[in-house]
Image: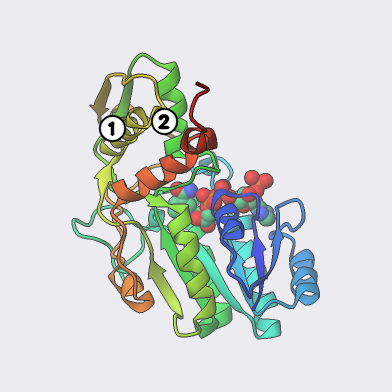
Amino acid sequence: MRVLLTGAGGQLARELAASRPAGVELAALTASELDVADAASVAAAVRDRAPEVVINAAAYTAVDRAEAEEAAAFAVNAQGVAHLAAAAAGRGARLVHLSTDFVFDGQAREPYRPSAAAAPLSAYGRSKLAGEQRALEILGERATIVRTSWLYSSRGRNFVTGMLDLMAEREALSIVDDQQGSPTWAALLAAALWSVARRADMPGVWHWADGGACSWFVFARAIQEAAVARGLLARAIPLAPIATRDYPTAARRPAYSVLDTTATYGRLGLTPVPWRTALGRMLDEMLPAASSTAPPADG
Ligand SMILES: NC(=O)c1ccc[n+]([C@@H]2O[C@H](COP(=O)([O-])OP(=O)(O)OC[C@H]3O[C@@H](n4cnc5c(N)ncnc54)[C@H](OP(=O)(O)O)[C@@H]3O)[C@@H](O)[C@H]2O)c1
């Protein structure tokens, strides 16, 4: 299977490249190698690489900055997706496109199904929803949208790596406790996406997240506990739960954005890995190789 992967420098794309299955011929193009906002470049890349599947992991992901740069977010997250969809349509290729829990307004009290009404609170969310719509309009059954949430990996800048840095530097931290979501390890999503890429029977919108849900505060506490237990942090610092109103940001975020992933796991024949288990596996990846393979000390 020939696959064209966009946004190859991003955290999810790096997990995809690292887990490329045998039999996949992968063209992984970074933002500097392929700007998805440039229609002509996208058309040329798809013509030259002749992929059977395009996986779009490119995105404008600066959620707060997007409030002041909505046009820039739309250029990548909406027009960019349309360019990829049009190029894929011209060659009979499928598009597997990533989207976000931030398409929802967070008013629900039970997990959002893929069919639930989207009502984004932010410019980023609006741009991602527009991208979903363009992909489905242009490609119909040959578009697969995978929404995910609270993504992290050992390779990128994300909540987990950011918390580890802050916990090492600061004496105490306050963390938002009134937003609920599902942390999701990008490595498990990448493995699922390789299955999705092979399946023509997954048109439309699907949800993927690790099992369970928590607040950012509970997530941070779990990160600290697991990192101290592994020696990744020397000591635990006091963590205090705070309200969203006490941590103002440019973009509004949903108070509740847990995704109902039942259909996706069912279709793929997989069982969700609880988010704490996934977090532990990611932190294990961050352990210096020496600590697991060190030879016995001399003498
Ligand atoms: N991170 C999360 O918590 C989260 C949650 C839900 C959904 N998602 C979605 O999951 C997907 C992957 O996110 P991620 O966390 O891997 O994001 P990421 O680390 O920010 O990666 C996005 C990549 O896209 C590249 N990019 C930006 N503009 C581009 C353009 N015009 N053309 C080509 N590439 C461009 C970026 O390059 P530069 O760095 O050089 O700009 C970056 O390498 C995205 O669709 C995102 O919306 C993420």
Mark 1 and mark 2 residues within 8 Å of each other at the beta carbon: no
Disc number placed over residue 163 in the picture, else none = 2
Q: Considering the numbered disc 2 on the image, is that residue within a helix, a strand or a loop?
A: helix
Answer yes or no: disc 1 within 8 Å of ligand 1.
Answer: no
Is 21 placed left or right of 283 in the picture? Answer: right
Q: Identify the residue at image location x=53%, y=33%.
A: 290
Vertical side of 48 occupied by 184: above or below: above
- The extreme front residue here reads 299
237 or 217, which is in the foreground? 237
**Coordinates of residue 41 in the picture (x, y in percent):** 78, 64
133 or 261, which is in the foreground? 261
Vertical side of 23 occupied by 41: above or below: above
Q: Identify the residue at image location x=29%, y=36%.
A: 222
Q: Identify the residue at image location x=46%, y=32%.
A: 162
Residue located beneath label 1 in the image: 221
Q: Which three-letter amino acid code belongs to the residue tagged 1?
A: Arg
268 or 119, which is in the foreground? 268
Cα separation between marks 1 and 2: 10 Å
Chain-order first, disc 1 or disc 2: 2
Is 2 placed left or right of 200 in the picture? Answer: right
**Coordinates of residue 44 in the picture (x, y in percent):** 80, 70
